[in-house]
Image (cartoon, helix red, strand yellow):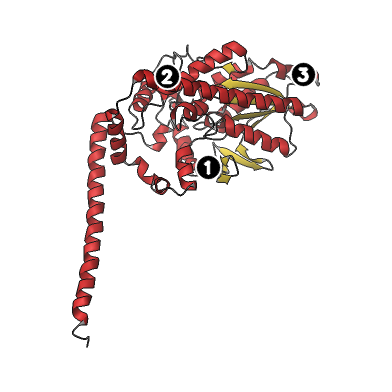
Amino acid sequence: MPSADSTPSSSLFQRFFAFIGYLIFSIVLAAAVLELGAFGIWTLSHGARPNRQEKLGSASPAYADFPWAAEFWKEEAQRRKLHNGGYVPFRIWGTPEFHGKYVNNDKYQFGVVRRNIDNLSADCKNQPITDIWMFGGSTLYGSGVPDWATISSLLATELNKTPKRCVAITNFGTEAYNSNQELLLLLEQLKAGRRPDVVILYDGVNDSYTGVYQPGIATAHMQYTQISARVESKLVGKLEFLRHSYALQLARRLALSKQKQDPEAMEAETKLKAVQTLDNYEANLRMVRALAGIYHFQVYAFWQPSLAYGSKPIVPYEAELIRVDANSPDGSALKPMRFAYQEAERRAAANSDFVFLGNILDSEQEPLYLDEWHLGPKGNELIAHAIANKLPAIFASSTSAQ
């Protein structure tokens, strides 16, 4: 039998852990009630937050005429669960290998890249091939479109329409990359002994986003704050999963509304960040052109369109994308990015270092956008056509060798 003096301590021990269990249960219950209440308030005041698949554009009318769209978006949702290709030195992340009916990321000696549909003619088996490398973020990679509808595939198809012209494109586009990471990727390929005939850079959105919005640093990369917090073992990095809760989003929204900020000072700061963003972008272009002089390839750079800029007639779906952006708990991204686009347009006109396509869709009446940044197949076709019209040197190089 237990001794008489062990019963009170055992009972105290049990009461202590019962109290701890009750406390944890109460905290979890309170958090659930708080999150449910925040969800109700957020939905009433801002409307339902789009889920991840909708944000990728599955609800976009840009896919209304494609009977295979539902099957494609189901596959795209599966691909997105891979997130990225794991840690890559210096570039932080890469492209994950994936194979499906509509989307394929193929592994080669030089890494994993999105499959490109070149549509080379049979005559190209006995002809020199112009090797084009394209670099960009998710818009070039082709988030939200099948392999055949990426900008690089559509560009190759258009360039290869001319008899006996043989152009092969490697799509080095990587989701969430900006020009800083693209320069590193190009350097890696050149150091490995690989050589292109032409390099095409397609940027704008990601450089603007990181430069003037989050984190607001021209030399940074996407998810800079979260990744640096994890590397530095900060508490905020360990609690990143809480960032998407409605309660914290509502709290951030309330905090932003209470802040007293001078609109003129904020605009001046954003304009300065826009200048720094374009300074950094053009510095990267100079580095690429210096490499082109050493390794003997041609360079073309394009600044892409987005809902942040231009005068495209807005359809209801695109208007809803703009509304959701304006009601973001972290503040609108499109509004500050307009300053970067204004600066980009000014510089493109002044020095011709790159081609500004920010207003290329201004006359397009139909729905083109999947979200604030990405275009559907029709939009990508328009971009590919615009790029092709700016590449006369490719025609000369591919035909002169014949």
Quadrant in the picture for the C terminus: top right
Front position among marks 3 and 2: 2
Q: Which of pointers 1 and 2 lies earlier in the amino acid sequence?
A: 1
Q: Please state if 299 lies on the left or on the right of 61 as rendered.
A: right
How far is disc 3 from disc 2 in space, using C-alphas? 50 Å
* Horizontal and vertical percent position of residue 82: 50, 44
Residue at image mark 3: 399
Q: Quadrant of residue 179?
A: top right
Dot 3 or dot 2, earlier in sequence? 2
Q: Nearer the viewer, mark 3 or mark 1?
A: 1
Q: Is residue 199 left or right of residue 333?
A: right
Question: Which of the two residues, 46 or 90, is positioned nearer the viewer here?
Answer: 90
Q: Which residue is denoted by mark 1 in the rendering?
A: 84
Residue 90 % position (x, y): 59, 41
Q: Which residue is under mark 2? A: 268
Counting from the top left corner in percent of width and height, residue 210 is at 48, 30
Residue type for callout 3: Thr
Q: Residue at x 52, y 27 (%)?
A: 207
Q: Are circles 3 and 1 on residues that touch, CB within 8 Å?
A: no
The numbered mark at residue 219 is: none
The local secondary structure at tag 2 comes to helix
Residue 85 picture location, percent across and down = 56, 44
